[in-house]
Structures are given as C-alpha cells and as structure tokens.
Amino acid sequence: MTLLMFVIGACLGSFLNVVLLRDDWYIGRSHCESCNYTLQWFDLIPVVSYLLYRGRCRKCGKKIDVQHLASEVYMGCGFAAVGMYCTTDIMTAITLLVAVTFLCICAICDSKDMEISVLFLYGGIVSVAVLKMFHLCLCGEWIDLIKFIIIYGIVYLIFVFVSIFCKNHVGEGDFDILMIMLLAAGLYHTAVSVTIASVIGLCVYLPLLVTKRITRKEAIPLAPLLYVGFLFNLIGGM
Ligand SMILES: [Zn+2]
C-alpha cells in the first residue's frame, strides 16, 4: 500500500513539476530543454528514469534540473506517508492527500523562485477547509462544524493581523501554509510539524551560516522545511 501510494504520488509530482516549470505544458509532448528530443515513456518513469540516466538527457547528455527528481520524491513521500497513517478513514485520507499536494506545490515553488502563487495558497486553504467541513457534515457533528468555522476564522484573522506586523520577517505565504497545516491536522500536530521543521532548518542552515556560505540576510525558503516537518509528523503516526 505504501509503495503504491509512493508511485501514485511520484507520478503526480512529475506531472505537477512539468505544469509548474513549463508555461506551454498542455501543448505537445515532454521534450529535452536543450536538444528538443521528444521523451519516450521509458524516459518519463518517475524517479527511476532520473536515477538510471544519472540525471542527464539520454540523447545529448545535458544535465537535467535536480528539481525534477526532488518534486517526484517530495510528492511520492507525501502520499506514502498518508498511506502509512490512514488505512481506514477515507475522508481523513482524502483531506490529508489534498493538503499534502498543496503543501508540496508550495514547497516546489518556494525552493524554485522563493515565491508562491496565491492561487496555490488559497486553493489549499479553501480545499482543505471545505473537505473538513464536508466530513463534519457527513458525521452529523453540527456543533463541531460551527466550532470549526468560528475557531479557524479567528485563527486566520490573527494570521492576517500578525503578517501585516511581521512584514520582512516571515514570508507572506508562510502563514497560509501554516493555515493549510492547521486545517488538515489541528493545532497540536501543526506545532509538532513546525518544531521538526525548525530542527531540520537549524541542522541544514546553521553549518552554512557558520561557514559563511549564506549570510544572515539571505532569505531561506520555509515551505520545503514545513512540508518535510509535516511528513515526519505523519510518518510518526500523527
Ligand atoms: Zn537533450
């Protein structure tokens, strides 16, 4: 089950990466950016093709952006983590898969351009919120539904308020990412995910800071860290 979910996630990650990288993704078949060679099906097997050809085009040997592999692995691990965590509750699994997909898109965009489109941020918040409310309606838990709307409405307003005062300290999209995590997993698990993300961030960026490979003023993409934190939390049996 976990392996199947990884494969589905990796395929989706591969597709999303093409959509995010190429403006003309809906026209024609995938091709090599440098020699224009039209990729065959065996060039497009997520993760496997990249590793098999050692990250190079099969025809011209030009290096392929490692981001292709990263987004396939990111999304594959996300789906596998949900598969490991949810085996019985279908609605929770669907909500988490949608949350993971949007968080992964945000992570890819943030690590590529340090910029996340509001379409993905609000798309994630609205989709996860609607799924959660639908789940509560299905269970007939009307009081919980009203509580959900009031509590998360207030939390979102607080985030908007804080982000106005935190300009230049926290990226504008980071609060929206936190909101997606909160809606999907609740306060406790979001706090755990953020803690894990902070520890990973420290381990990755502190040595770079000490060796002066990055400066203190350099902006660090937080979305990939939050995504990895969220996945570790899922795998740990959220
Ligand atoms: Zn090529």
Image (cartoon, grey):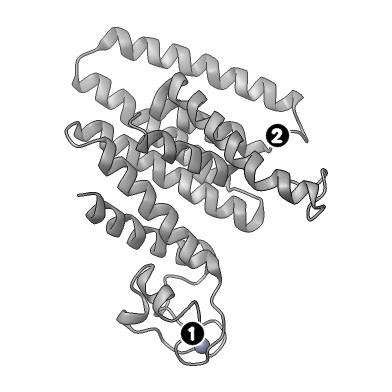
Name the one closer to the observer, 56 or 143. 56
Residue drawn 33% across and 26% down? 132
Q: Position of residue 42 (x, y in %)?
A: 31, 81
Residue of label 1: 57
As drawn, the label of residue 170 is: 2
Residue drawn 42% across and 26% down? 183
* Residue 82 falls in image quadrant: top left
SS state under label 2: loop
Of badges 1 and 2, the one in the foreground is 1
Q: Position of residue 5 (x, y in %)?
A: 26, 52
Please give the count of numbered marks on the rendered protein: 2
N-terminal-most mark, 1 or 2: 1
**Mark 1 residue type:** Cys
Residue drawn 56% across and 37% down? 197
Q: Position of residue 62 (x, y in %)?
A: 56, 85
Image-based side of 88 in relation to 181, left or right:
left
Name the one closer to the observer, 189 or 199. 199
SS state under label 1: loop
Q: Position of residue 98 (x, y in %)?
A: 36, 41
Q: In the image, is residue 161 above or below residue 143?
A: below
Q: In the image, is residue 139 above or below residue 101?
A: above
Pointer 1 residue Cβ closer than 8 Å to ligand 1:
yes
In the displayed image of the protein, which residue is found farthest to the left? 88
**Residue 220 in view here:** no
